[in-house]
Amino acid sequence: MTSMTSTTAPPAVPARGRRRGGIRLAGRLTQRWLPFVLLVGVWEAVTRATASPFFPPPSEIVAATGDLWLSGPAHRLFLTDLAMDNLLPSLGRMLLALAGSAVVGIGVGIALGRSERVFAYLNPILQFSRAVPPPTLVPVFIVLFELGTQMQVASIIFSAIWPILLNTADGARSVTPLQMDTAEVFRLSAVDRIRYIIIPSALPKIFAGLRLALSLSLILMVFSELLPGTSNGIGFQLTDAQSRSDMPAMWSVIVLLGVLGYLLNTILLAVEHRVLDRRRPARTNGKVGA
Amino acid sequence: MLEIKDLTHTYADGHVAVRDVNLTVANGELVSIVGPSGCGKSTLLRCIAGLIRPAEGQVILDGRPADGVPEGLAVVFQDYSRSLLPWLSVRDNVALPLKRRGMSKAQRREAATEALESVGLAAAGGKYPWQLSGGMQQRVSIARALAYRPSLLLMDEPFGSVDAQTREDLEDLTLQVRGGNDMTILLVTHDIDESVYVGDRVVVLGASPGHVRADLPVDLPGPRDQISTRELPEFVRLRAEVGRLVRGVTETTATAAK
C-alpha cells in the first residue's frame, strides 16, 4: 500500500509553482467564505438596528458561545464544565448510535444485496419501517426502552440505519459479476468474499450512506434530548436556555450544533478520501491500464 | 484426465448453447478450443469451471464427476481488469486465493512473489493492477493462476484484449509456464493462428448449438517460435484446415477429420 506513493506521487513542485498554488488556494478560500462573511455582516447590522430581544446580534452570540462553551482550561481544549457535561454525553450517544447503525446496517445490507431470498423476505418490512418518520416512533421507544440514554440511542439508530442499510445493499448488489466468478473459481471462503470483494466494492456507497446517516443522527440526537427523561445534552441545553428566556445561550447552542455538524462531516469526508483514494487511479496523473 | 461426456447446456430462455459435447483431455495436454463467435466456447468453459451446472452430461476430472467448482482449477479470464481486484496490490491479488490452501501469510507472500517472477513481473508486486498496462495485468492473472498450482488451467480468450505484440509474448509465456508446471490447459480462443501455435490439439467447435466439429492433433516440433514455427508447412496446412472448419466450409479435409 505504501509503495503507491512512489509511483503516483507527482514530481516535487518547484517553489514558484507552490507559491502560485498558495495564492490560488487563498483565492479559493476567499471565494468560499465571502458570502458567509457578508451574510453575518448583514445579520449583525439588521439585528443591531432592530434590537429585538429574540434576535441578538451574531457578535453577542459568538461571545455567549465562547463564554458558555469554550472558556475552559487549555488542557481540556478550552471546553467548559458545561461543555464537558453536555457536549460529551450528546456526542457519545450519537457516535454509539452511529456505530451501531453502521454495524447492523452494513451487515444486513450485505445480506440484502447478495441474497435474493433475504431481499424477498425483508424488503416489504424495510420499506414500511423506513417510511415511518423516526420522531413519531419516539413515544414507542419511550415505552420500550429505559428513559434517557437507551431511548435516545434507539431513536437515533432507527433514523440513521436506513441510508446505511439501503446504500450498502445497493453497493453489494452491484459487485462486478466477474469478480464473484473469480472468487468462486478460487474457492474463496464466504468471509473472504465479503472482506476482499463485497465490502470494498460497496465502500463508496457505504460512505454515501454514512454521510446521510451522520446528518440524520445529529438531528435525532437533538430531538431525542428535547424529550422527558433527559438531564443533559446539547438539546437539553437548548430547551433549558429557552425556558430561561436566555436568547444568546439558545442561539449559542444552535451555532454550536452548526459547527459540530460541519466538523463531523469534514472528518468523515477526510476518512472517506483516505480510504477510497488509495485504490483509485489518481485523478491527475494516475496511469490507467489500457 | 478431464472427460466431458454428452454435455448439453440450455439457457433459461431456451437457447441451446452446446449440445452433446464429448471431449477427453489427457493430463499435461494443452488443448485449444476454437470456433466462430456464438459457438458456445465460453459456455463450455464455464461448465467445466463449475460456474454453470450443465443441463445434461458430466464433467469428470481424474475419475470423479465434478459437482461445482473442482479443486485444483484455475481460470484466466479475458477481462483481466474486472477479474483482478483494483483495491489489492498486485502481490495481494496473486496471494489471495492461497488463503484456502492453508498457507501462512509469509508462505503466501513468497509464493506470490515467485509466481510474479515467473511471468516477468518481479518488480510490480507492490503496485496496483490499474497502474499496469493491459498485457501486464493479464500476466498478473496468469501469475495468480500459477501460484495456485492448478492441475487444470482454463483460459477464456485470455489474449483477446491486448495488442498483437503483447499477444505473442503472452502465447510464449503460456507455453513456457506450461513447460515448468505439470498441468492441463484448455485455451479457448477465436484466433485460428493462436489455436494452432499454442495447442497440442485443436478442437474446433461448430455453432448453433455448439458441438465438436473436429479434433485435430497438432504435430509441430517444440519449442515453438513465433517466426519459424509459423513458417512450417505443417503450421500453414493446419491453419488453413482449422480456418475452413471455423468458417463452416465443409470440404474434404473437414469430413476426414470428423
Image: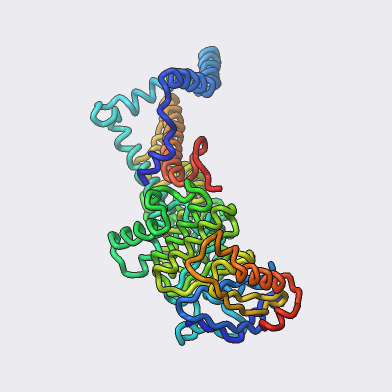
Depicted B180 relative to depicted A28: above or below: below
The answer to which of B200 and A242 lies nearer the viewer is: B200
Residue at position x 44%, y 60% in the image:
A107
The answer to which of A265 and A87 lies nearer the viewer is: A265
The answer to which of B218 and A25 lies nearer the viewer is: B218
The answer to which of A39 and B44 lies nearer the viewer is: B44
Residue at position x 57%, y 82% in the image:
B23
The mark total stands at 0
Model colouring: rainbow
Give the x, y percent position of residue A211: 49, 44
| Residue B104 visible at all | yes
Task: Tell me where residue B79 sits by quadrant.
Answer: bottom right
Residue at position x 45%, y 34% in the image:
A262
Give the x, y percent position of residue B83: 51, 59
Residue at position x 34%, y 23% in the image:
A67
Give the x, y percent position of residue A10: 44, 33
Task: Tell me where residue A13 sits by quadrant.
Answer: top left
* A92 displayed left or right of B167: left
Give the x, y percent position of residue A24: 50, 20
| Residue A213 visible at all | no
